[in-house]
Image (cartoon, rainbow, N blue to C red):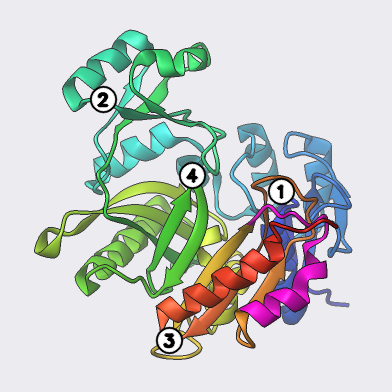
Amino acid sequence: MLTPPTVAVIGGGQLARMMQESAIALGINLRALVEAENGSTGQVTVDKAAGIPADLDAVSALIDGADVLTFEHEHIPAQTMEEAGRVVSVQPPASALLYAQDKLEMRARLSEMGIPCPAWARVADAAELERFGAVIGWPLIVKTPRGGYDGHGVAVAHSPADVESWWGSGPLLAEAMVPFTGEVAALLARTPSGEIASWPVASTVQVGGVCAEVTAPAVGIRPETAAEARRIGERIAAELGVTGVLAVEMFVVGEGTDERVLVNELAMRPHNTGHWTIDGAVTSQFEQHLRAVLDLPLGSTDLKAPGSYSVMVNLLGSAYSQPARALADAFAAGGPGAKVHLYGKDVRPGRKLGHVTVVDKDPGLALTRARAAVDALKGSSATD
């Protein structure tokens, strides 16, 4: 008797939670290795087990009988990737995921390809950082090559003393501080067979290193710049052999006909900058990721409402212990078009608890309404 396709996923945060929604619609069994059974994904997934990516026994049980293994974050040990690859199709493969796991490897590979990036250097100690700063100019951006996310592992350094505590665990990535005029994200998916489908390039706003707002299609940039960002994203996916969803975050620099993009970060999984696709695109990034890793034909990335804009605003922290209790206020503030997505997480200051998307032909109005709904969920004066 045939059984439904099984997609094994490592990670139990909001990304795997939203994969589960698409898996249900497609009749796919999503089997998750979660950090906690009552966490964001554990609350909504039947086929699950608690464990960590480094636990080879847990991963072995996860992939037993699965059609494919994928991830909702990049923090996967090399040994886990190697052992899993002997048993099941791993998408994206270790050879591609490396460039999302290690920023130094990513910078070196993209530079080799001629992809525009900020000026950068591998620095092994304070003296090397001092020399790079003398050439490029201070302040610099300094990053730990592995393990950083949402602003963690990233520092603005005015001198080597600002990252003194980071030495000792290996070289760091030092970059020029880019005088950018905006930020955009190219989002696409690629199958193992090589099919690629891109969504409209989106403009993004980061606050404290965390994605706060996204508008798709992008506002404030030239169509030629958006087309170049899309071309760069598709070239990276093809040449690195990426499978599943790829998000390429970029800085926009220059003005007028000199406007161009520089690649900042890569993510090989559904990404915060693509959450708008759930309500704004024919195929969401979560459905597309499942299609892609199973090597199924990809879905349309067209806008559901041609000529409209999808604006997503993140809910980062809340004064409510349970933001869902503020849904009435959120819908009243955001209007009937506001779509609320909450992740079932315990509330902590600044934590990603959910997002709101509004689709409208007027991006300014959509942003105002999405912000209003998020403010209601935040409930800054709440006393629950």
* Mark nearer the N terminus (4 vs 3): 4
User: Picture quarter containing residue 46?
Assistant: bottom right
| Number of the label disc, if any, that sits on residue 138 | 2
User: Horizontal and vertical percent for residue 76?
Assistant: 64, 39
Residue 327, magenta (yes or no)? yes
Closest to the camera, between mark 1 and mark 2, is 2
CA separation in Å, label 1 and label 3: 45 Å
On the image, the x and y values in percent for residue 154 come to 47, 33
326 part of magenta stretch: yes
Q: Is residue 177 above or below residue 31?
A: above
60 sits to left or right of 210: right
Work out whether residue 292 or residue 33 is closer to the camera in this orientation and state it.
Answer: 33
Identify the residue at image location x=68%, y=37%: 80
Q: Would you say the magenta stretch is mainly helix, strand or loop?
A: helix
Residue, disc 3: 308
Q: CA distance from mark 2 to mark 3?
A: 42 Å
Q: Residues within 10 Å of mark 2 (few under 14, many from 20)?
A: some
| Residue in the picture at 48% in, 28% down | 144
The boundaries of the magenta stretch are: 316-333
Amino acid type, mark 2 = Trp
Q: Which mark is residue 209?
A: 4
Residue 161 x/y as whole percent: 40, 13
Mark 1 lies on residue: 87
